[in-house]
């Protein structure tokens, strides 16, 4: 497995191969980082979000990118993503197929991308309303985490990153969990300082199962089976959906006696009644569950629980059992 180099810095890199790069960036960044963006002779502004990952729109964007690439020696081309997880997923996919693979560099501009999506080498595209149905394993060569970019993010981004933060803390169970459960004031400085531990926590799992072939990497899907349904059906942010998904797994696990009581989760996760309301609003999950790409051979879903922090569990469950639990928790 090729390891990505993770570089922490205060400001956007001064020394950079601007000439051989194709910058794919979230156009929202023009306002604050326009000057740096203009240093790339080849830069393509993109509108972020799930529609960017829509494979139906891929040919149009790809035409621009291929035009850019024509002036460059194939071996030198670098695809640089500057944006959140949607831009990163899109750029990662592009880099993996353009000329059968060119160098990929991520500069995440959201907390979610900085702590999670830019690491681990997965990218993904959507097919109609079905998320992440296409993708490749293609790790970035470098990931630049830039303090100036991240600490300026509006407050709501911090809240939207908590789902992945608590997820990885629950999976890791060590120092990361101890720090997350110490009731820190969750401001930018705190999350910035936690990034190295979070990334290490994720990469510990990824490196044991890069291709997701041994069933280990599935544990990173904690909170995501339910989360993706809420995200898809209600349009909630990814991070918020994962927070609800963690609550779902916690309640489900305790009912099955797989999960111990973890009092800190009461203040970390959204209250039960808020989850109930969302589940009711989303309605029947079956059609979404049936599309879940984590369906295992015998038509069951690999559902992720945890016993205690640091002890994630995988259980293969029939769709009907999850749908039943969904109904139960809706009430
Ligand atoms: N590949 C993976 O391993 C992986 C893991 C987790 C999530 N994801 C994917 O990541 C996506 C979610 O990530 P996201 O929330 O970062 O998505 P996003 O790219 O849609 O960004 C969220 C919002 O933040 C805005 N934004 C970005 N940078 C900003 C900045 N510096 N200041 C102000 N606003 C800014 C965007 O314009 C957008 O409105 C989903 O598509 C999800 O499937 C992928
Ligand atoms: Zn996620």
Image: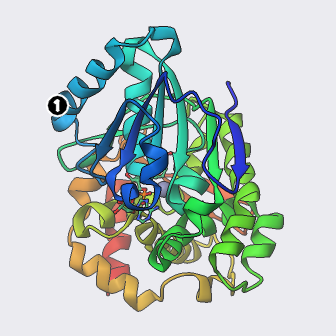
Question: Residue 251's x, y, as percent?
Answer: 52, 78
Task: Report the image quarter containing ligand 1.
Answer: bottom left
Q: Is residue 295 visible?
A: no
Question: Residue 291's x, y, as percent?
Answer: 28, 46
Question: Residue 281's x, y, as percent?
Answer: 22, 79
Q: How is the image coloured?
A: rainbow
Q: Nearer the viewer, residue 302 or 106?
A: 106
Q: Residue at left 49%, top 47%?
A: 36
Q: Nearer the viewer, residue 186 or 63?
A: 63
Mark 1 close to ligand 1, CB under 8 Å: no
**Res 71 → quadrant:** top left
Q: Nearer the viewer, residue 325 or 26?
A: 26
Q: Residue at left 18%, top 27%?
A: 59
| Local SS, label 1 | helix
Residue at the spot of label 1: 60
User: Which quarter shows the C terminus?
Assistant: bottom left
10 sits left or right of 253 in the view: right
Above or below, 125 against 261 in this view is above
Question: Residue 93's x, y, as percent?
Answer: 39, 31
Q: Is residue 326 visible?
A: yes
Above or below, 220 against 39 in this view is below
């Amino acid at each position: 497995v090729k390891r990505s180099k993770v570089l922490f810095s205060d400001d956007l890199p001064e020394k950079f191969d601007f000439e051989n790069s194709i910058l794919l960036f979230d156009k929202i960044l023009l306002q604050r980082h326009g000057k740096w963006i203009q240093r790339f002779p080849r830069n393509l502004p993109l509108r972020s979000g799930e529609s960017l990952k829509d494979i139906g729109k891929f040919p149009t964007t790809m035409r621009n990118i291929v035009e850019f690439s024509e002036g460059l020696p194939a071996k030198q081309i670098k695809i640089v993503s500057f944006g959140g997880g949607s831009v990163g997923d899109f750029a990662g996919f592009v880099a993996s197929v353009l000329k059968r693979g060119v160098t990929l560099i991520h500069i995440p501009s959201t907390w979610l991308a900085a702590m999670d999506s830019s690491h681990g080498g997965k990218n993904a595209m959507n097919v109609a309303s079905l998320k992440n149905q296409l993708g490749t394993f293609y790790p970035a060569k470098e990931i630049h985490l830039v303090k100036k970019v991240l600490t300026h993010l509006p407050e709501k981004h911090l809240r939207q990153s908590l789902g992945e933060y608590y997820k990885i803390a629950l999976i890791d169970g060590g120092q990361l969990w101890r720090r997350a459960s110490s009731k820190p004031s969750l401001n930018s400085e705190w999350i910035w300082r936690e990034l190295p531990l979070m990334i290490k926590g994720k990469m510990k799992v990824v490196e044991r199962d890069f291709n997701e072939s041994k069933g280990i990497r599935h544990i990173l899907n904690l909170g995501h089976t339910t989360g993706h349904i809420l995200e898809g059906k209600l349009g909630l942010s990814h991070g918020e959906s994962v927070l609800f998904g963690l609550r779902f797994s916690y309640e489900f696990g305790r009912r099955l006696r797989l999960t111990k009581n973890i009092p800190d989760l009461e203040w970390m996760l959204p209250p039960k009644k808020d989850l109930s309301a969302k589940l009711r609003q989303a309605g029947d999950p079956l059609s979404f569950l049936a599309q879940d790409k984590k369906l295992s051979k015998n038509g069951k879903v690999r559902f992720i629980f945890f016993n205690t922090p640091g002890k994630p569990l995988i259980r293969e469950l029939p769709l009907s059992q999850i749908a039943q639990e969904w109904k139960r928790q809706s009430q």
